[in-house]
């Protein structure tokens, strides 16, 4: 297998929305690819999908996932960055960051509701 170079843009850790760890299944569909993977975190703007085989930067896809206790989502997203898999094991979290695109008001409100639910459940107080 060929090693891929990391394509995480400089300054990508300066996020404007909190990310919350999750462990949900996701189906990702592009024009020519279907990927069944796991979402490892979510924010109001996107998700991180753990996979050893990320698709190319800029690829648009349809994301289908079902947070526990909430109706399923079917959203569009684009690959914003890639954390490449390395065979030598020095990257324990390979995958791709997906930015949601074309979210309608209702979809955005549902995502925010899910985020608030996660934050509330995990709040130690």
Image: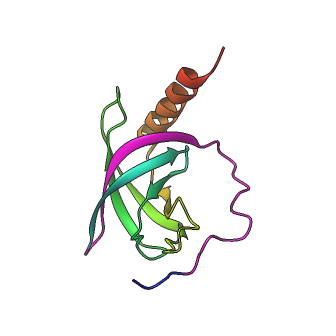
- Residue 37's place in the image compared with 43, above or below, is below
| Residue 26 vertical position relative to residue 85 in the rendered view, above or below | above
- 11 or 110, nearer to the observer: 11
Residue toward you, 73 or 26: 26
Q: Is residue 55 visible?
A: yes
Left or right of 24 on screen, residue 78: right
Q: Position of residue 42 (x, y in %)?
A: 51, 45
Q: Is residue 88 above or below residue 75?
A: below
* Main secondary structure type of the part rendered in magenta: loop
Residue 6 on the magenta segment: yes
Q: Is residue 13 shown left or right of residue 96?
A: right
Quarter of the image with the N terminus is bottom left
Residue 17 counted in the magenta span:
yes
Q: Examine the rendering and report whether any part of residue 101 can be seen.
A: no
Residue at 59%, 75% (x, y): give it: 7
Q: Which region is colored magenta?
A: 5-32
Q: Residue furthest top?
A: 125
Q: Residue furthest bottom?
A: 2
- Residue at the image point whose x is 30% and y is 69% from the top: 30
The percent coordinates of residue 101 (x first, y second) are: 47, 58
Q: Residue at x 69, y 52 (%)?
A: 15
Name which residue lies at 38% across and 42% down.
24
Q: Quadrant of the C terminus?
A: top right
Where's residue 102, x and y in %? 45, 56
- In the foreground, 15 or 25: 25
Residue 46: percent from left, percent from top: 51, 51
């Amino acid at each position: 297998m060929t090693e891929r170079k990391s394509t995480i843009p400089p300054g990508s850790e300066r996020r404007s929305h909190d990310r919350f760890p999750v462990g949900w299944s996701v189906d990702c569909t592009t024009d020519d690819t279907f990927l069944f993977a796991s979402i490892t975190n979510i924010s109001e703007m996107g998700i991180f999908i753990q996979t050893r085989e990320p698709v190319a930067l800029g690829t648009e896809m349809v994301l289908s996932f079902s947070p526990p206790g909430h109706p399923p989502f079917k959203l569009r997203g684009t690959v914003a960055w890639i954390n490449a898999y390395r065979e030598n094991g020095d990257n324990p979290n390979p995958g791709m960051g997906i930015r949601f695109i074309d979210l309608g008001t209702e979809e955005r409100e549902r995502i925010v509701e899910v985020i608030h639910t996660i934050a509330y459940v995990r709040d130690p107080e």
